[in-house]
Every structure is written in structure tokens, then in C-alpha cells.
């Protein structure tokens, strides 16, 4: 029995190692999203057809019909690189579309191909592809197909991305490396979790919701942002990182990592871009421009800057000219926990209906509406990651909801939640933000086997 369990665990770990790749998400979804100083890019591909949309102040689209089936794409500073496997002749066909001039070039690389876990990216100088025969080697090709360099790492390459304005970053053995001159140099300070996307030249965010602030050859700070896996990137304006979570864009103070502002859209953006100080929020076939001044400020009243003080109450300024503070203690409950520091409402029992939730809350002088995926919900059960939007005097404040043991957002706790929690514990799944509150059934600040046992007990 023990040998069988060990064999199963070994197979699971092997599958995780095979599937972990910054390029895998791109290829499996067949949609690529990225941003740099030249704009935000959304590139979708199906068979031999590619659709390209570039967002700046406006959106400009183009389409490509190619001779080969597309295996992957990347983009940087107006260049869209498309990879096609020619398995019949053992070639990797590379197309380069120059968006500004509407020109299309191509070349072939012999004895190279893209697998589902092959990493790749591009910058102004070259196209970088992980060697499919040696996953610890990175090859750099010029835009006319010449091999420029080979870079070798001690461990497997598990992530690649281009810098916002310059540079290429690689992740090997959870260490971040930056290309300087003709060498990759380790960026020390923190281990990183790819896939990574740049928010500007010095701030990177993992799709798992971890932000990293780079200062030279070290990661100076790291903090967690609320996110849903699959988000392609946020943006930095001034000293704030803006990052989407569902239909809400949150603003974080880069120096402290605190959530300090928020704004709710009518759709769910997956990509943000800094357009001369305004935010271009890009969603599924739609986009919107948002000014930072439109965000609701969440200024904490405590000044001790203690990261562990998660229950501190914020004083939130009105958007009108008198700047008088709103007392969020008016939003409270005798049944649930209301965290006014993180804007969470948690310890909600499974299968709590929307009407029950409202009756168990106190919010005199406020209106309240519950949202799921950007739509108002008036019936059914509340689920983890739903939002309760409280309004008063023209102001709106969004609280995220956490239902005990509900990791799927369905509003109950069942075998799917147990399996997701088990996957999390072995590294096959990840979640953050309000989902970690829902998973911590023992309320000890940790997620472990104790929470699994408690979750099974409730089934």
C-alpha cells in the first residue's frame, strides 16, 4: 500500500513538473496577453489564423493567415512573433509581424520545436527559445534567424518574460535571472513563482498573486495582491501598483504592499496598461480607460505600519470636497467576521443564502448589492470571492466574501473543495487572497492537513 502511494505521489509530482511553464498557459488557452511601454497586446490564435489587437489610447487590430498551424506567440514593442512547428521537415517556422509597418517576415530554425512546456519570449534584440532537447539551455536568435547566443543554467528553465522597457528575465530553480550584457545574473532576495508579467521596469507580478519589486540585482520587497489565476498583468503609476481581481482593480502602495484604493468596472479585465497616467483596462473584447483619481481611497487610521495588524480599521475619504471620514464600523455583523483592514467578510457558513447574509449584516444608512463575476445577484447562495458593495452618499466600498471551506466559489463545501485543497498542499494548485481565508478552517493562519480534516468533517 505504501509503495502504491509513493508511486502515485511520484506520478503527480512528475506531471506538475511537466506542466509548469510560463508558455504552457499561453498555449493551452490559445490567447496571449502582455504589456510594455508600446501598448497592451492580446493575440489569439486558432489553427493557422492569428488575431492581433494592440491597445493604446485606442485599439488597433490585425489578422494573419499563415501556412502552418500556430503553436505559440509572444509580443514586444510592436513586434509579434508567431511560432509554428513543421514536424514533417523538423523545422520551427518563425513569423515576425511588425505592427507599426504592417510587414510580415519569416525564417526557419532547423531541429527545434515548441512543446507544451517550452518557454519563449522576445525583446528588441532577439527571440529567446528554450532548447527542447535541453530544458536548462536558452537559445537567442536574431530577427532574421541567426543564432546569436546560448545560455546555460544549472537547473531547468521554468519561466521566461521580457522586461517592460528592456531586458529578459528567466526563472531557474525559482531564482530570477536578468540578462545583462551577454550573461544572466541572479536577482537575489526572494524565490519567485512563474509565470511572471512585468507591471513596469522594476515591478513583476506572478499569476499566483505575488508582486516582486526589483532594485538592481536584488528583489527589495515582495507582497501579495488579490488576484485570480490567469491574469496577465497590472501596471504601475507613480508609487502604486494597480492589479485586477475579477471586476475590481485594486491599488497597492509599492513601498508597504498595503491595499490603498479600489475601483469597480462593469467587466472583468485581465490586463492593465499605463497610458500617460491613466489605466487602460483590457477585458474580453472590451476595454476602458480609468483615471487614478476615480479610485476609492482606503487610508488606514493606524500609523504603526505593522503588516501583521490585519484587523485595523481604515478611515475612507469621501470623494467630495469636504474629505470627511466615513466610519466603516457601521458595517458589522454579530454572525460573521468583518475585516475592515482587508475589506473581507468571512466565517460565513456554507449554503448561506443572499437573503440570510443581508439579514445577518448591520449596515444602517448604507445600501448593499451582491455581485458575482460583475453581475448583481439577488437570489441563491453566497460564495467565496463574491463581493458585497456597500453604498452611502455617492461612495461605494467593496468587501470580498469568504465562505468556510468553499474554494470553488459555489457557496458550499464538497469533495471538489477537498480535492482542490489537497492539490494546494502538494503544489498542484494555488490560490490566494480571500480563498486562503476560506481554506483556513482552523483559523490559525496556516493551511495544512488540519484544515483538510475539518473540511472532510463538514461533508
Image (tube, grey):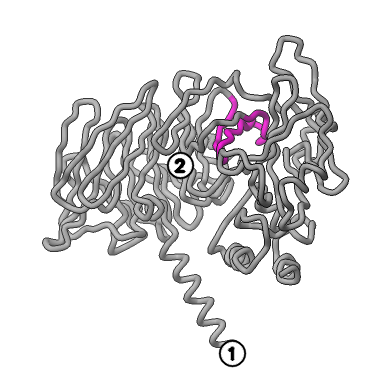
153 or 27: nearer the eye? 27
Q: In this view, does 97 lie to the left or right of 77?
A: left
Q: Along the horizontal axis of the image, is 324 left or right of 121? A: right
Q: Residue at x 52, y 46 (%)?
A: 206
Number of numbered labels in the structure image: 2
For the point 45% across and 29% down, the residue is: 273
Binning the other alpha carbons within 10 Å of mark 1 as few (below 14), some (14 to 19) or many (20 upward) gives few
**Placement of the C terminus among the 4 image quadrants:** bottom right
Residue at image mark 1 = 1
Instruction: Specify start and end residues of the magenta stretch as a single range.
Output: 239-262
Are there few (<14), some (14-19), or many (20+) residues within 10 Å of tag 2?
Answer: many
Which residue occupies the foreground of this view, 184 or 373?
373
* Residue beneath disc 2: 232
Precedes in sequence: disc 1 or disc 2: 1
Q: Which mark is residue 185?
A: none
The residues tagged by marks 1 and 2 sit, at their Cα atoms, a distance apart of 42 Å
Q: Where is residue 312 in the image (x, y as percent from the top left)?
A: 81, 36
**Depth check, front residue: 126 or 394:** 394
Q: Based on the displayed image, in which of its 4 quarters is residue 282 positioned?
A: top left
Asked which secondary structure carries label 1, the reply is loop
Amino acid at each position: 500500500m505504501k509503495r502504491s502511494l509513493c508511486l502515485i505521489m511520484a506520478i503527480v509530482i512528475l506531471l506538475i513538473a511537466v506542466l509548469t511553464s510560463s508558455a504552457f498557459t499561453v498555449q493551452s488557452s490559445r490567447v496571449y496577453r502582455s504589456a510594455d511601454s508600446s501598448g497592451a497586446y492580446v493575440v489569439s490564435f486558432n489553427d493557422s489564423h492569428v488575431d492581433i489587437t494592440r491597445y493604446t489610447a485606442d485599439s488597433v487590430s490585425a489578422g494573419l493567415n499563415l501556412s502552418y498551424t500556430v503553436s505559440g506567440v509572444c509580443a514586444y514593442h510592436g513586434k509579434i512573433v508567431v511560432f509554428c512547428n513543421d514536424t514533417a521537415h523538423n523545422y520551427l517556422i518563425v513569423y515576425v509581424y511588425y505592427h507599426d509597418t504592417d510587414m510580415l517576415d519569416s525564417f526557419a530554425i532547423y531541429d527545434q520545436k515548441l512543446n507544451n512546456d517550452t518557454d519563449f519570449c522576445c525583446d528588441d534584440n532577439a527571440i529567446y527559445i528554450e532548447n527542447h532537447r535541453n530544458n536548462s539551455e536558452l537559445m537567442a536568435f536574431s530577427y532574421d534567424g541567426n543564432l546569436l547566443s546560448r545560455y546555460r543554467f544549472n537547473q531547468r528553465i521554468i519561466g521566461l518574460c521580457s522586461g517592460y522597457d528592456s531586458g529578459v528575465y528567466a526563472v531557474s530553480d525559482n531564482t530570477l535571472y536578468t540578462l545583462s550584457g551577454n550573461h544572466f545574473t541572479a536577482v537575489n532576495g526572494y524565490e519567485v513563482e512563474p509565470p511572471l508579467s512585468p507591471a513596469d521596469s522594476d515591478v513583476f507580478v506572478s499569476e499566483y498573486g505575488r508582486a516582486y519589486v526589483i532594485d538592481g540585482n536584488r528583489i527589495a520587497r515582495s507582497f501579495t495582491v488579490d488576484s485570480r489565476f490567469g491574469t496577465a498583468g497590472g501596471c504601475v503609476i507613480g508609487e502604486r501598483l494597480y492589479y485586477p481581481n475579477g471586476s475590481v482593480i485594486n491599488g497597492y502602495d509599492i513601498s508597504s504592499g498595503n491595499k490603498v484604493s479600489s475601483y469597480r468596472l462593469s467587466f472583468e479585465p485581465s490586463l492593465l496598461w499605463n497610458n500617460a497616467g491613466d489605466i487602460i483596462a483590457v477585458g474580453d473584447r472590451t476595454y476602458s480607460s480609468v483615471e487614478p483619481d476615480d479610485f476609492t481611497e482606503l487610508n488606514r487610521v493606524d500609523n504603526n505600519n505593522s503588516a501583521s495588524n490585519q484587523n485595523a480599521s481604515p478611515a475612507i475619504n469621501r470623494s467630495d470636497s469636504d474629505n470627511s471620514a466615513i466610519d466603516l464600523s457601521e458595517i458589522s455583523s454579530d454572525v460573521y467576521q468583518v475585516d475592515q483592514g482587508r475589506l473581507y467578510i468571512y466565517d460565513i457558513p456554507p449554503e448561506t443564502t443572499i437573503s440570510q447574509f443581508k439579514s445577518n449584516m448591520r449596515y444602517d444608512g448604507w445600501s448593499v448589492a451582491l455581485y458575482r463575476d460583475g453581475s448583481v445577484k439577488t437570489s441563491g447562495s453566497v460564495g467565496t470571492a463574491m463581493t458585497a458593495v456597500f453604498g452611502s452618499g455617492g461612495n461605494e466600498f467593496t468587501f470580498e466574501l469568504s465562505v468556510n471551506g468553499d474554494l470553488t466559489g459555489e457557496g458550499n463545501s464538497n469533495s471538489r473543495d477537498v480535492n482542490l485543497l489537497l492539490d494546494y498542499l502538494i503544489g498542484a494548485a494555488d490560490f490566494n487572497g480571500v480563498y486562503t481565508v476560506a481554506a483556513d478552517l482552523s483559523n490559525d493562519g496556516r493551511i495544512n492537513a488540519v484544515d483538510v480534516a475539518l473540511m472532510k468533517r463538514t461533508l
